[in-house]
C-alpha cells in the first residue's frame, strides 16, 4: 500500500496537465454544490420566515369537511377557497391550551371585499361644505367654489363627449343640460348670496353624476388584532395608531394603501421609480414611456388643490428647478415629463415642495370607511368601521405578497361573512320571545296556518308597545358599531374559518403537528392540519420547484463533468502504457494498478473538494454578513427582505466533498480498468 500510494502521488505530480484539468473541474463542482445548497437552504428558511411570520403561523387548522384545501397566499385574487368553517373557535382554543408544544393560537377568517375612495368632485364639495359651515373667509370659499366649478365644467364636457358617441343619448342629453346650469355665472352668483342653498343643489343634482372615486378591491383578514400583533413578531405599525384592544377597526396594508389610496401623481412617480430600480428604463422600455406620458397629462390634479398663494410658491420652486419662466400648468407638465436621470430628484422635490399643499391620500387614519363584501349566500353586506392606520411586516415593506391582506376585527369579519354575533343573536331571540314567535317543524306548519284557531289574532301591539320594541331593538346598536368596544368574550367565541398555530420555541414542526393532532382528536374536533408550505399554495411550492430545478441542473453539470474527466483520464492512461507495462513487468498485479488509479483520483478529489468548498464557503460567509440583494421586489418575499443572508453548514461541505469523490471515482472506473489490462510486454515494446 505504501508503494502504491507513493506511485499514485508521483503520477499526479508527473502528469500536471491532466491533474490540473481534472482538479479544476472538481474544484468548480465543489464550489457550485456548496454555494447552491447554501442559497437553496437560505431561500427556504427565508420563505418560511416570511410566510409563518406574516399570516400562516407554523400550522393551520380548518374544517375537515372543506371542499377546497386551505390556500392563504397562492390562490387567484378573484377566488376564495371554500374551506368550510369552524363554528366554535372556543373549543379549539380550549383543546390546545394545555398542549406544551403550542405557544399560541390565532383565530382567522379571510375574504375579498371592496371600498370606495371619494372622487375629486366629492372631495372638492366636501372641502367647500366645510368652509361654508365654518364661516371661513370669503376668499377661501371663493377659491374652493372655483375648483368645484372647474370640475363641474369638465364633467359637463365629458358627458357631452359621451353623448356624441352613445347610441341612446336621451339620458346623457338630460344630464348635460342639467350640468350646464351649474357652469353658468348666474348659478355661482346665487351661490355667493346663499351658499347653503347652492351646496344643497350641488349635492343633490351634481354630485351623483360625478366620478365615484376609486373602487378598491382587496383581501381582508378578520382576526383577534391584539393577538395577531403579539404573535407575528414582524408586524409593525406604519401610519396612524393601532386598533385599541376590544374595539372594532380596520388596518390597511401599507403597500396597498400606497398603491391605491395615494394621490395619483405621487403613486405614478413611485411606480415608475420602482420599475426603474427593477431594470425597466424609461429610455428603452415602452411601458415606462407610456407611464411618463400619462403622468405628465395629470398636472391639473395639482393645480386644482392649490390656492393662489400656494400656486405662486410652487411656481417659483419649479421655475428655479427647471430654469423656465412659463406659467404653472406648463411648468408642471414639463416637471412631470421625467427621464432616467432626473426621476429620483424630481420625485423627491415633489414630496418636499408640492405634496405639503395637496391631499396626498384620499383616506386618512381616523376616517370612517365602508367595507363591502358578499356573504356566502350571495347577499351584499356593508359596514362602517374606523380606519386606524396601516401596517407592514419588517423587512417586507416593499413586498406585494407580504402585504396581500388588510386586517379587521373578527366581529366585523363575521358580519360581512353573513354570521350573526352573539349579541345580534341574543337581540333576535329577545324579539322573538317578545313577539311570541316559536319555531315550527315541517309537520306543524299546515296546522298552524290552516288548523283550528288559525285565523285568530293572538296578540296586537299598540303604538307605544311597537315604539318600545323598536327602542329595544336598536338599543346597544352603537355599542356594536364604529368606535365602541366589542362585547366581552366576543373574540374568543364564535365562528372562524381557520386557526393559525404557533409552536413553542425549539419544537420541531412534525412533533408539534402530532401533538396538535392528538389534542384535537381527544377533544372530538375534526379539523385538517396543514403546514405553512401547503397553506401558501403555489408560493409555498416555489421552493420545491427551485430545489428540483437545481438538482436537475447540478446532475446535468456533473454528468458532463464525468464525461470530460473520463475522457481526460482515458487519454492519460493511453499515454502511460509504458509506465504501467513496466510496473506489471516488475510484479505489480492488476488489483494494485486499479488501486493506484483510484488513489490518484481520491487524492486529487480530496484536495479539489477542500479547495472548492473553501472558496464556496468563503463566498457564502461573506453573503451571510453583507447580504445578497434581491434582484427585484418580487423576490423580496422569497429572500425574506431586501437581502438574503445565507448560512454555511457542515452538511453543505460534506455533501460537496462526497459528490466530488463519487463523480471522480465513477470517472476513474473505466480508465483504471484499461490500465489494469496493459500487459507487461508493453514495456519491452517501448524499449524496441
Image (spheres, rainbow, N blue to C red):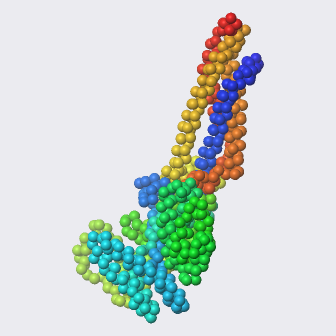
Figure quadrant of the C terminus: top right
Task: Reply above or below: 504 against 194.
Answer: above
Residue at 46%, 55% in the rendered image: 75
Coordinates of residue 486 in the picture (x, y in percent) = 53, 74
Residue at 51%, 75% in the rendered image: 329
Residue at 31%, 70% in the rendered image: 165
Coordinates of residue 492 in the picture (x, y in percent) = 54, 67
Residue at 47%, 85% in the rendered image: 145
Q: Closest to the observer: 153 or 616? A: 153
Figure quadrant of the N terminus: top right
Regarding residue 131, the answer to whether it shows in the image is no
Q: Closest to the observer: 660 or 274? A: 274
Task: Reply above or below: 610 against 60.
Answer: above
Task: Reply above or below: 639 against 265.
Answer: above
Q: Closest to the observer: 541 or 334? A: 334
In-image side of 251 versus 678 (left or right) = left
Amino acid at each position: 500500500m505504501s508503494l502504491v500510494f507513493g506511485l499514485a502521488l508521483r503520477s499526479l505530480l508527473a502528469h500536471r496537465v491532466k491533474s490540473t484539468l481534472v482538479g479544476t473541474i472538481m474544484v468548480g463542482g465543489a464550489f457550485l454544490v456548496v454555494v447552491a445548497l447554501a442559497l437553496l437552504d437560505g431561500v427556504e428558511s427565508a420563505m418560511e420566515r416570511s410566510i409563518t411570520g406574516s399570516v400562516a403561523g407554523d400550522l393551520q387548522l380548518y374544517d375537515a369537511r372543506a371542499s377546497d384545501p386551505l390556500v392563504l397566499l397562492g390562490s387567484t385574487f378573484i377566488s376564495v377557497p371554500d374551506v368550510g368553517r369552524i363554528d366554535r373557535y372556543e373549543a379549539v382554543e380550549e383543546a390546545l391550551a394545555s398542549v406544551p408544544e403550542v405557544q399560541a393560537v390565532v383565530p382567522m377568517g379571510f375574504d375579498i371585499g371592496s371600498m370606495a375612495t371619494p372622487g375629486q368632485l366629492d372631495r372638492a364639495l366636501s372641502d367647500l361644505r366645510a368652509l361654508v359651515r365654518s364661516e371661513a373667509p370669503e376668499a377661501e370659499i371663493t377659491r374652493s367654489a372655483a375648483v368645484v366649478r372647474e370640475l363641474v365644467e369638465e364633467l359637463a364636457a365629458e358627458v357631452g363627449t359621451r353623448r356624441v358617441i352613445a347610441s341612446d343619448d336621451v339620458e346623457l342629453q338630460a344630464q348635460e343640460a342639467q350640468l350646464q346650469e351649474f357652469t353658468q355665472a348666474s348659478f355661482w352668483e346665487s351661490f355667493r348670496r346663499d351658499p347653503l342653498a347652492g351646496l344643497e343643489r350641488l349635492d343633490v343634482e351634481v354630485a351623483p353624476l360625478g366620478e365615484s372615486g376609486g373602487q378598491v378591491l382587496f383581501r381582508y383578514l378578520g382576526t383577534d388584532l391584539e393577538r395577531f400583533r403579539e404573535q407575528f413578531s414582524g408586524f409593525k405599525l406604519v401610519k396612524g395608531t393601532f386598533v385599541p384592544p376590544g374595539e372594532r377597526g380596520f388596518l390597511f396594508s401599507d403597500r396597498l394603501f400606497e398603491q391605491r389610496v395615494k394621490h395619483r401623481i405621487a403613486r405614478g412617480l413611485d411606480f415608475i421609480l420602482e420599475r426603474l430600480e427593477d431594470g425597466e428604463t424609461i429610455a428603452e422600455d415602452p411601458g415606462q414611456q407610456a407611464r411618463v406620458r400619462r403622468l405628465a397629462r395629470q398636472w391639473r390634479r395639482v393645480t386644482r388643490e392649490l390656492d393662489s398663494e400656494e400656486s405662486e410658491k410652487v411656481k417659483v420652486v419649479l421655475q428655479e428647478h427647471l430654469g423656465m419662466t412659463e406659467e404653472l400648468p406648463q411648468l408642471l407638465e414639463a416637471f412631470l415629463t421625467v427621464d432616467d436621470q432626473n426621476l429620483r430628484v424630481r420625485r423627491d422635490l415633489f414630496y418636499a415642495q408640492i405634496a405639503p399643499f395637496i391631499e396626498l391620500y384620499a383616506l386618512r387614519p381616523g376616517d370612517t370607511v365602508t367595507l363591502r363584501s358578499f356573504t356566502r349566500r350571495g347577499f351584499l353586506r356593508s359596514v362602517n368601521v374606523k380606519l386606524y392606520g396601516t401596517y407592514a411586516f419588517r423587512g417586507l415593506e416593499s413586498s406585494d405578497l407580504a402585504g396581500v391582506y388588510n386586517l379587521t376585527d373578527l366581529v366585523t369579519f363575521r358580519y360581512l361573512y353573513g354570521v350573526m354575533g352573539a349579541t345580534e343573536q341574543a337581540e333576535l331571540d329577545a324579539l322573538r320571545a317578545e313577539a311570541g314567535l316559536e319555531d315550527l317543524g315541517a309537520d306543524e306548519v299546515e296546522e298552524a296556518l290552516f288548523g283550528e284557531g288559525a285565523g285568530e289574532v293572538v296578540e296586537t301591539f299598540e303604538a307605544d308597545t311597537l315604539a318600545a320594541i323598536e327602542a329595544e331593538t336598536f338599543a346597544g346598536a352603537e355599542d356594536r358599531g364604529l368606535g365602541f368596544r366589542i362585547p366581552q368574550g366576543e373574540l374568543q367565541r364564535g365562528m372562524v374559518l381557520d386557526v393559525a398555530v404557533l409552536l413553542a420555541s425549539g419544537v420541531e414542526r412534525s412533533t408539534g403537528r402530532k401533538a396538535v393532532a392528538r389534542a384535537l382528536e381527544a377533544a372530538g374536533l375534526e379539523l385538517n392540519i396543514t403546514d405553512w408550505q401547503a397553506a401558501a399554495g403555489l408560493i409555498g411550492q416555489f421552493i420545491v420547484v427551485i430545489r428540483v430545478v437545481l438538482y436537475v441542473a447540478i446532475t446535468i453539470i456533473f454528468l458532463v463533468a464525468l464525461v470530460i474527466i473520463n475522457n481526460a483520464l482515458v487519454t492519460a492512461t493511453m499515454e502511460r502504457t509504458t509506465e504501467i507495462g513496466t510496473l506489471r513487468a516488475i510484479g505489480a498485479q492488476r488489483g494494485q494498478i486499479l488501486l493506484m488509479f483510484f488513489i490518484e483520483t481520491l487524492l486529487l478529489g480530496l484536495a479539489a473538494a477542500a479547495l472548492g468548498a473553501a472558496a464556496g464557503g468563503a463566498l457564502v460567509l461573506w453573503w451571510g454578513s453583507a447580504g445578497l440583494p434581491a434582484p427585484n421586489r418580487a423576490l423580496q418575499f422569497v429572500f425574506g427582505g431586501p437581502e438574503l443572508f445565507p448560512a454555511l453548514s457542515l452538511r453543505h461541505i460534506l455533501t460537496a466533498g462526497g459528490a466530488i469523490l463519487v463523480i471522480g471515482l465513477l470517472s476513474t472506473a473505466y480508465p483504471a480498468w484499461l490500465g489494469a489490462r496493459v500487459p507487461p510486454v508493453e514495456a519491452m515494446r517501448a524499449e524496441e
